[in-house]
């Protein structure tokens, strides 16, 4: 019968091995590589761990190996449910593989993002998921020079060779624009800002493609100055103040927060949504779902993005130099709600008076 060592300090791996009647190597495998141990043996070791209250010394392991059993996730912002969904998906996937997820939000500040990346590196994470709105090439290159794999989420890099998981944002803009056209809209106001942000630019390309398929449809560019609600409030007020024959008869907000703010301003000005102006968002942000008019939008599959990104990161961590970078593209679907559907088109006569010559105008 194995003799359990005396305890005058917190239980150690030696106590666990003695209680379970196995070697130190077996205990280590159960903790770090459970696939190498039979179910019966692993169960016996886990019972010993539970009975003794043993906690693995992750700091000591990190000092020995140079890395911890953790991965980092640096987000652009927590104000969009897309990113919180990413956290949920990546966290669930990490737990399934015995990893801990460390998360930080840069709140759209690239300097803060760099600080978070440096912290993740100092915490000896084994890899990083970066949900950035820009390529951040210098920051990513600095991290990867120290041997740390980085996977982009919601961004497809062009100058950095790295894996990425994205939603087809061009399709998102296309199906949202097509939906508005199908509702009878012929002057579509595109409320947007920050064209340097990849999702913004690609959604606009998709909208332009939808408009190009309908020669009688024109685009009205409405610069919101910012992708957050204050920009939408200003844009909505400017749209409401336009003469009726020049005003867009449909609006696509490049983000749901912009679109919801536009809805609020239009309704405050006595303009009915969707009867007079249907309004759609484009990123399925649950933060924007609490308005008086439920918002039509396009799915972004944040949870699936988090799961797929974690899988790519694990593959790179495992394969090392043999790893081949790839991009996973997830599809988008339109979710039609009351902000665009159920419209009665009583203003058909306005079509004949709406100026339709220029393909693009600015407001």
Image (cartoon, rainbow, N blue to C red):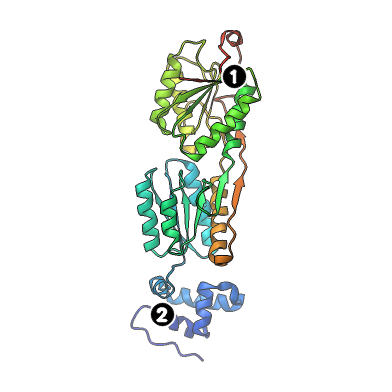
On the picture, is 319 further left or further right than 81?
right
Indicate which label's residue lies in the foreground, 1 or 2.
1
On the picture, is 229 further left or further right than 28?
left
The residue indicated by pointer 1 is: 185
The residue indicated by pointer 2 is: 12
Q: Where is residue 275 in the image (x, y as percent from the top left)?
A: 56, 17
Q: Is residue 173 above or below residue 347?
A: below
Q: Is residue 32 visible?
A: yes
Q: In terms of depth relative to the viewer, which is nearer, 251 or 319?
A: 319
Q: In this view, does 202 lie above or below 92?
A: above
Q: What residue is rendered at 41% in x and 65% in y?
A: 124
Tags 1 and 2 touching, CB below 8 Å: no
Give the number of marks: 2
Q: In this view, does 95 lie above or below 177?
A: below
Give the label on residue 215, or none: none
Categorize mark 1 by other alpha carbons within 10 Å: few (<14), some (14-19), many (20+). Answer: many
Mark closer to the chain start, 1 or 2: 2
Q: What residue is rendered at 46% in x and 40% in y?
A: 80
State the image quarter where residue 202 is shown: top right
Quarter of the picture holding the C terminus: top left
Q: Position of residue 330 (x, y in %)?
A: 61, 45
Q: Is residue 203 above or below residue 50?
A: above
Q: Position of residue 326 (x, y in %)?
A: 59, 54
Q: Where is residue 166 in the image (x, y as percent from the top left)?
A: 56, 46
Q: Can residue 336 be seen in this view?
A: no
Element class at badge 2:
loop
Alpha carbon distance from label 1 to label 2: 70 Å
Element class at badge 1:
loop
Q: In terms of depth relative to the viewer, which is nearer, 49 or 121?
A: 121
Q: What residue is rendered at 41% in x and 52% in y?
A: 138
Categorize mark 2 by other alpha carbons within 10 Å: few (<14), some (14-19), many (20+). Answer: some
């Amino acid at each position: 019968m194995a003799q359990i060592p005396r305890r005058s300090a917190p239980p150690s791996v030696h106590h666990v091995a003695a209680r379970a009647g196995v070697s130190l190597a077996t205990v280590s495998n159960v903790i770090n590589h459970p696939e190498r141990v039979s179910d019966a043996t692993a169960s016996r070791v886990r019972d010993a761990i539970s009975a003794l209250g043993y906690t693995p010394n992750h700091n000591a392991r990190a000092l020995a190996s140079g890395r911890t059993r953790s991965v980092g996730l640096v987000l652009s912002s927590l104000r969009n449910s897309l990113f919180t969904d990413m956290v949920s998906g990546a966290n669930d996937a990490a737990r399934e593989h015995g990893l801990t997820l460390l998360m930080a939000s840069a709140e759209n500040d690239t300097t803060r993002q760099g600080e978070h990346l440096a912290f993740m590196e100092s915490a000896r994470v084994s890899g990083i998921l970066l949900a950035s709105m820009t390529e951040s090439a210098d920051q990513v290159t600095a991290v990867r020079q120290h041997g740390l794999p980085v996977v982009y989420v919601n961004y497809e890099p062009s100058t950095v060779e790295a894996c990425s998981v994205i939603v087809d944002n061009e399709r998102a803009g296309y199906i949202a624009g097509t939906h508005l056209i199908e509702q009878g809209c012929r002057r579509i106001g595109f409320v947007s800002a920050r064209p340097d942000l990849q999702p913004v630019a690609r959604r606009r390309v998709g909208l332009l493609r939808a408009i190009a398929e309908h020669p009688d449809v024109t685009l009205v560019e409405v610069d919101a100055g910012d992708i957050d609600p204050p920009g939408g409030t200003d844009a909505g007020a400017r749209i409401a103040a336009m003469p009726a024959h020049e005003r867009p008869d449909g609006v696509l907000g490049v983000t749901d927060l912009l679109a919801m703010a536009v809805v609020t301003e239009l309704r405050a000005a006595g303009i009915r949504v969707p009867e007079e102006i249907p309004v759609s968002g484009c990123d399925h942000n649950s933060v924007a779902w609490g308005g008086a008019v439920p918002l039509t939008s396009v799915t972004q599959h944040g949870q699936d993005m988090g799961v797929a990104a974690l899988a790519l990161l694990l593959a790179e961590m495992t394969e090392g130099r043999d790893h081949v970078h790839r991009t996973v593209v997830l599809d988008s679907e339109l979710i039609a709600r009351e902000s665009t559907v159920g419209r009665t088109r009583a203003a058909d006569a306005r079509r004949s008076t709406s100026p339709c010559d220029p393909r693009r105008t600015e407001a």
